[in-house]
Image: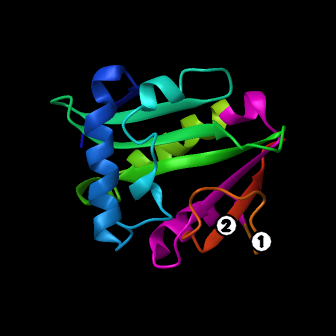
Amino acid sequence: MKYTIREIEEKDNKEIENVIRTCLIEFGANHEGTAWTDQNLGRFSEIYNTDGNKYWVACDEKEKIIGGVGIGKLNGIEDVCELQKMYCLPETRGTGISHKLMDIALGYAKKYYSRCYLETLENMVAAQKFYEKYGFKRVYEPLVKTEHFACDLRYIKNLK
């Protein structure tokens, strides 16, 4: 599969929202306490264009968005970022796109932060294995209170 990865633009907001919602439905996470009810879901180009915050989209050869990932500040902890809204459509899984997105996101995160945190769901088993391959270690308590209270698994990775 041929694809390109670029920083999000305003024209991408609705399309990446649709990718995320598609994945949330797939995993039964289309409910409160997940990205499903995140008020910023359709505003990524605004939210992620500030220092220490960035979002990338993966596009196929027809410029259709097939995945994305973000790095965002974690409120309340200065040197820790959060890997945010990393989702890829089912047909892209196993193609290397997720690895490229992760490499770009972590490369960016290292410039600003010493650790990277993430929250996920227990039924996203393949995602957990993916995060662990990248050196994320499970933590059993949230670092901060986020709006994603339904996420029942948390990971952290040292970046330095």
Residue 126 is left or right of residue 141, and the answer is left
Q: How many numbered marks have been drawn onto this rendered protein structure?
A: 2
Q: Nearer the viewer, mark 1 or mark 2?
A: 1
* Residue 113 falls in image quadrant: top right
Estimate the x, y position of residue 158 in percent, counting from the top left: 80, 50
Picture residue at 61% right of the left edge, 61% below the top = 119
**Is residue 120 inside the magenta stretch?**
yes
Q: Which residues are magenta?
A: 109-137
Q: Vertically, is 131 above or below 14? A: below
Estimate the x, y position of residue 20 in percent, counting from the top left: 34, 51
Q: Vertically, is 137 above or below 61? A: below
Residue 65 in view: yes
Residue 130 is left or right of residue 37, and the answer is right
Q: Amino acid at mark 1?
A: Glu
Picture residue at 64% right of the left edge, 56% below the top = 118
Q: Which disc number belongs to residue 154?
A: 2
Circle 2: element type? strand
Circle 1: element type? loop
Q: Amino acid at mark 2?
A: Arg
Q: Quadrant of the C terminus?
A: top right
The reply to whether discs 1 and 2 touch (Cβ–Cβ < 8 Å) is yes
Q: Which residue is mark 1?
A: 141
